[in-house]
Image (tube, helix red, strand yellow):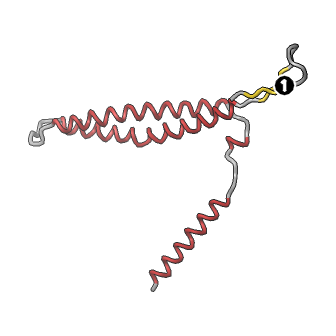
Amino acid sequence: MNIKVLAICALVLFITAHASGQAKIERSPLETQPPDPHLLMKYQKMKNSGAALTVVGSILFVVGYATMLESDLLDENDTNLQTGAICTIAGMSCLGPGIPMWIVGAHKHRKLSKLQSVTVKPIAGIQYQGLTLSFRF
């Protein structure tokens, strides 16, 4: 009986938290403020760093795994198994943060670039009569 009550309470808590999370409608700072050029550079660096970590991690993982497969398990003086394990672990350690950094950096960089590329400016010249608005997408 106690398990049923606990399960119902957990379900109600989950539904309440989920509903209150949906009710919050706040705009992100990227949508409410004008784009900051330093922020664009930050996300560009994040994207490049994530890509570099992913590529290096993939190479280390493949090389380490291949080295471990080629090692002799019965030979005590063979260091290929240890070297392969170290390369494989280092490759996974680079892949773990590299993929999310690449994805988040690329997403936010693209979002900020779209905000920066939309401009409205008045153009006054001899060939134009009056005030003209120009949109660049």
Nearest the camera: 85 or 24?
24
Q: Residue at x 26, y 36 (%)?
A: 64
Image coordinates of residue 103 in percent, x first then y, are 50, 39
Q: Is residue 71 left or right of residue 4?
A: left
Q: Residue at x 57, y 34 (%)?
A: 43
User: Which residue is the extreme one toward the bottom?
Assistant: 1
User: Which residue is the extreme one toward the right?
Assistant: 130
Which image quadrant: the N terminus? bottom left
Secondary structure, mark 1, is strand
> How would you rate the neighbour count of disc 1 (Cα within 10 Å): few for under 14, some for 14-19, many for 20 or more?
few
User: Which residue is the extreme one toward the top?
Assistant: 126
Q: Quadrant of residue 39?
A: top right
Q: Residue at x 83, y 21 (%)?
A: 123
Residue flagged by tag 1: what amino acid is it? Thr
Image coordinates of residue 40 in percent, x first then y, are 62, 31
Q: Is residue 42 left or right of residue 57?
A: right
Q: Quadrant of residue 111?
A: top right
Image coordinates of residue 72 in percent, x first then y, are 12, 38
Nearest the camera: 20 or 130?
130
User: Which residue is the extreme one toward the left?
Assistant: 74
Q: Is residue 34 left or right of residue 50?
A: right
Report the label total.
1
59 is higher (above) or lower (below) than 92? above
Q: Residue at x 21, y 34 (%)?
A: 67
Image coordinates of residue 137 in percent, x first then y, are 68, 29
Residue highlighted by disc 1: 132
Q: Quadrant of residue 37?
A: top right
